[in-house]
């Protein structure tokens, strides 16, 4: 058995999915894995299902019809995890940009007092490999922009590699989380901090995918840029008492 569930949303990740699953299950700390697949036409879900007999009781998949957004996939996964009472719940990409070895360090941070542990690219310098300089700068200054607007002291506001203690996801009204792209990552950190939870950053090295296709788009970036202002204004009218 495991007290930790790793949620991995997928869309067309056939090149990476088996390798990432096997890597997670090779760690000395036991984890369960939940794949949320949004109808990948490349057969990602079939690969996962072919591995379920080998990892029976440890590997799970939920299939949804069509691309519904990163945020909705994680909300779906959070609710699934809460129904099964996992104490530690993780977000991780399928493409090895997040090193599965760091799952252990994120969990340790939560065991040792953090409510949310963020795998941070920028808490100790800039730790990004294989990204073009333009994208590094866009990501770095996006986090500066988030800090300026929201006043939260998080160096990597858009990070998507995280561990939550169960109490955080039980407290945040998940049905009120509005954003579906990368702004979702900002909104979850902002909301956790507003509720008074302790969010810590754990330094990681982020390595851009070598296989498969990035899901970043100008629409996603625009949602994040404008959404931060909307989120901050909306927070003036919300009650964050636990």
Image (cartoon, rainbow, N blue to C red):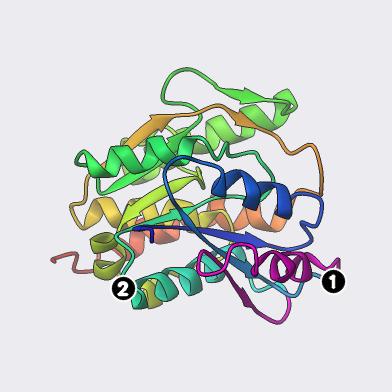
- Is 162 in front, or is 138? 162
The stretch of residues the image draws in magenta is: 42-66
Is 221 situated above or below 97? below
Figure quadrant of the C terminus: bottom left
Extreme-right residue of the structure: 42
Q: Are marks 1 and 2 in contact (CB under 8 Å)?
A: no
Tell me the SS state at disc 1: loop
The CA distance from mark 1 to mark 2 is 32 Å
Q: Rate crowding at label 2 as few (under 14), some (14 to 19) or many (20 or more) other CA atoms within 10 Å.
A: few
Name the residue beneath numbered marker 1: 41
Q: Is residue 116 magenta?
A: no
Is 153 situated above or below 239? above
Horizontal placement of 39 versus 88: left or right? right
Instruction: Give percent across and percent down for residue 215.
Output: 73, 54
Q: Residue at x 40, y 60 (%)?
A: 231
* Mark 1 or 2, closer to the camera: 1
- Is 226 in front, or is 124? 124
Q: Is residue 116 visible?
A: yes
Q: Is residue 145 visible?
A: no
Q: Quadrant of residue 210?
A: top right
Instruction: Give percent across and percent down for residue 27.
Output: 51, 41
Q: Residue at x 69, y 58 (%)?
A: 219
Q: Rate crowding at label 1 as few (under 14), some (14 to 19) or many (20 or more) other CA atoms within 10 Å.
A: few
Instruction: Give percent across and percent down for residue 130.
Output: 73, 26
- Is 236 in front, or is 173? 173
Residue 173 got which mark? 2
Tell me the SS state at disc 2: loop
Is 120 situated above or below 222? above
Horizontal placement of 30 versus 8: left or right? left
């Amino acid at each position: 058995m495991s007290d930790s569930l790793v949620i991995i949303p997928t869309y067309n990740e056939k090149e990476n999915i088996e390798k990432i699953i096997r890597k997670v299950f090779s760690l000395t700390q036991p984890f369960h894995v939940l794949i949320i697949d949004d109808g990948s036409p490349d057969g990602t879900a079939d690969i996962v299902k072919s591995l379920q007999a080998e990892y029976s009781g440890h590997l799970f998949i939920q299939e949804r019809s069509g691309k519904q957004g990163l945020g909705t996939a994680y909300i779906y996964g959070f609710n699934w995890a809460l129904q099964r009472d996992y104490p530690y719940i993780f977000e991780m990409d399928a493409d090895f940009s997040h090193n599965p070895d760091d799952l252990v360090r994120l969990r340790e941070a939560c065991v040792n007092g953090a409510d949310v542990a963020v795998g941070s690219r920028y808490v100790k310098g800039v730790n990004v490999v294989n990204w073009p300089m333009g994208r590094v700068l866009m990501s770095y200054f996006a986090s500066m922009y988030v800090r300026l607007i929201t006043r939260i002291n998080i160096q990597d506001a858009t990070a998507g590699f995280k561990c939550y203690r169960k109490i955080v996801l039980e407290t945040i009204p998940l049905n009120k989380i509005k954003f579906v792209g990368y702004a979702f990552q900002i909104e979850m950190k902002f909301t956790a901090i507003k509720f008074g939870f302790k969010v810590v950053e754990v330094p990681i090295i982020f390595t851009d995918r070598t296989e498969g296709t990035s899901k970043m788009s100008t629409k996603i970036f625009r949602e994040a840029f404008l959404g931060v202002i909307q989120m901050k204004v909306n927070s003036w009218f919300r009650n964050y008492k636990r």
